[in-house]
Amino acid sequence: MMPLYAVICRDKPGRVETRAATRPAHLDWLAAHGGVQFAGPLIEDGAPIGSLVVIEAGDLAAAKAWVATDPYAAADVFAAVEVIEWKKAIG
């Protein structure tokens, strides 16, 4: 099994409409990557403010390269993206 990486993305303020318009392409992109373990939006006050994705990747560089191809990144939705190795402990 390859290492797991948590991808934590925070949206730029005012990008909710761009996020919604780009969501179908983003979901297709996630579905095309066989290593996605789970994914979903971060929510604050009922509205999306970012994303959390856990993926399998060969190494940190590969995980970061994959994240750079996210349609949300191309649409300039994210203010910040953090990619860090993650180990599953429970669940």
Image (spheres, helix red, strand yellow):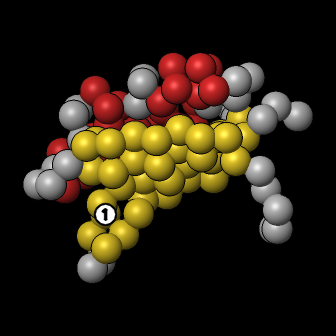
Dot 1 alpha-carbon crowd within 10 angstroms: few under 14, some 14 to 19, many 20 or more: some
Residue 5 locus on image (x, y percent): 65, 40
Of the pair 41 and 22, the residue shown nearer to us: 41
Please provide percent x and percent y for residue 77.
Answer: 24, 41
Q: Count the numbered circles shown.
A: 1
Q: Quadrant of the C terminus?
A: bottom right
Q: Is residue 6 above or below residue 40?
A: above
Front in this rendered view, residue 7 or 17: 7
Q: Secondary structure at mark 1?
A: strand
What's the residue at 11%, 54% (across, down)?
14
Write the residue at 52% across / 26% down: 64
Residue 27 visible in rendering: no
The quadrant of the rendering that contains the N terminus is: top right
Kindly indicate the quadrant of the structure image that contains residue 50: bottom left
Which of the pair 55/84 is nearer the observer? 84
Question: Where 48 falls versus 8 (above or below)?
Answer: below
| 28 up-or-down from 16: above or below | above
Q: Is residue 77 visible?
A: yes
**Picture coordinates of residue 51 (x, y %)?**
42, 53
Q: Quadrant of residue 78?
A: top left
Q: Residue at x 42, y 23 (%)?
A: 69
**In the figure, 89 relative to 63: above or below?**
below
**Direction right: furthest residue:** 1
Q: Which residue does the numbered mark 1 point to in the structure image?
A: 48
Q: Is residue 49 left or right of residue 5?
A: left
Where residue 11 sits in the image (x, y, percent)?
A: 27, 50
Quadrant in the rendering for residue 44: bottom left
